[in-house]
């Protein structure tokens, strides 16, 4: 298993810095679509079977490892199988885009109270969707601090997403929320809460060197921007796109075009993490 060929100058510099100084490196990873395959029912999502062994092999060799996800932190931990794994004692999971925080060393989730705008939107969202003519198969995932309107199960997911975009945006704005589009999903959440802010806050806590971030969807662009800002300041980083679209679904071009390295979905992420662990074990 060899190291990957990175296609950009900045990415090659980021990978070289990670290998040269792993004790200062941060490995940051999205969950759905990156560590777990995308599925029609988010509650049935589980990490790729190679994820936990790869993370457990790599985590002790780097400075820190964090999962940054829009899911509630507790669900990401459960669906990932991260709790109580030898080698993952220092893993952090930032859930709800950083609002929630789970630390493996304590096994506990820390989080503030949900914002009131989410509760108001939760009460009004069913009527708003019905009034917009939401097609059969549209459904709402309640994340506690955010609400996600999914169209993947509808007959025409793209048309449904376009139909509901305006009404959902108006409802969100009326309660001080923003809408984050994704792969057949519109997520309503408080402003200023995104993966870029979560990652930046996490990095501010430690003297981080190279940062590897891997994601698969539009919500990961904010984290990409955070790493790109660090690179503009002379700090190394590597941007990885997990690209494994479902049948009939187009790749997320905005992410792939900005990535230094594109890998084939969660299986490709596992292979990358395993190759890094092997290389770092070799150079120690």
Image: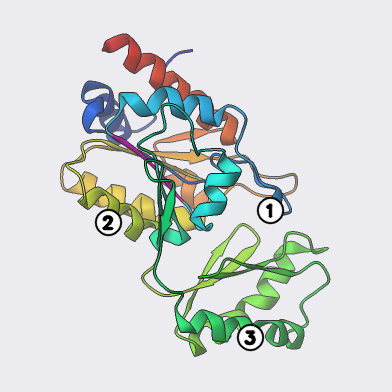
Q: Tell me the element at label 2.
A: helix
The answer to whether 210 is drawn above or below residue 154 in the figure is above
The C terminus: image quadrant: top left
**Residue 43 — which label?**
1
Question: Which residue is at 70% across, 76% downward?
Answer: 163
Identify the image quadrant of residue 17.
Answer: top left
Q: Residue at position x 52%, y 79% from top?
A: 118
The numbered disc on residue 201 is: 2
**Bounds of the magenta span?**
64-68
Q: Residue 5: in sight, yes or no?
A: no
The colour scheme used here is rainbow
**Which residue is rendered at x = 44% and y = 78% of the image?**
115
Q: Percent from the top left, x then y, of residue 133?
A: 78, 82
Which residue has dot 3 on it?
123
Residue 266 point in image, percent of width and height: 57, 35
The span from disc 1 to disc 2 (Cα, nearest Å) is 28 Å
Of residue 275 and residue 259, the one placed in the foreground of this image is 275
Give the class, few, some or many, for how many residues have Cα within 10 Å of label 1's Cα (few <14, many ≥20).
few
Answer with mark 1 or mark 3, whichever residue precedes in sequence: 1
- Image height check: is 171 above or below 279? below
User: Where residue 137 sits: x, y (%)?
Assistant: 80, 66
* Separation of residues labelled 1 and 3 (CA atoms): 22 Å
Magenta segment main secondary structure: strand
Q: Is mark 3 on a helix, strand or loop?
A: helix
Between the C-alphas of marks 3 and 2, the distance is: 32 Å
| Disc marking residue 275 | none
């Amino acid at each position: 298993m060899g190291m990957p060929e990175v296609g950009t100058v900045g990415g090659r510099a980021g990978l070289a810095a990670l290998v040269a100084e792993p004790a200062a490196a941060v490995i940051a990873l999205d969950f759905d679509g990156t560590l777990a395959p995308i599925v029609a029912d988010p509650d049935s999502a589980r990490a790729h079977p190679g994820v936990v062994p790869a993370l457990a092999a790599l985590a002790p060799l780097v400075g820190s490892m964090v999962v940054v996800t829009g899911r509630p932190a507790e669900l990401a931990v459960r669906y990932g199988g991260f709790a109580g794994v030898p080698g993952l004692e220092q893993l952090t999971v930032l859930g709800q885009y950083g609002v929630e925080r789970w630390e493996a060393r304590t096994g506990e989730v820390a989080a503030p109270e949900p914002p009131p705008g989410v509760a108001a939107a939760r009460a009004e969202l069913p009527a708003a969707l019905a009034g917009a003519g939401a097609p059969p198969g549209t459904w709402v995932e309640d994340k506690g601090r955010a609400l996600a309107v999914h169209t993947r199960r509808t007959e025409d997911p793209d048309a449904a997403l376009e139909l509901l975009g305006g009404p959902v945006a108006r409802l969100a704005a009326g309660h001080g929320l923003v809408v984050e589009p994704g792969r057949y999903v519109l997520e309503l959440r408080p402003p200023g809460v995104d993966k870029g802010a979560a990652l930046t806050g996490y990095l501010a806590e430690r003297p981080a060197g190279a940062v590897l971030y891997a994601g698969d969807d539009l919500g990961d662009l904010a984290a990409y921007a955070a790493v790109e800002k660090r690179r503009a300041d002379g700090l190394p980083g590597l941007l990885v796109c997990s690209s494994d679209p479902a049948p009939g679904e187009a790749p997320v071009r905005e992410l792939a075009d900005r990535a230094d390295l594109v890998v084939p979905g969660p299986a490709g992420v596992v292979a990358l993490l395993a190759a890094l662990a092997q290389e770092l074990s070799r150079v120690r």
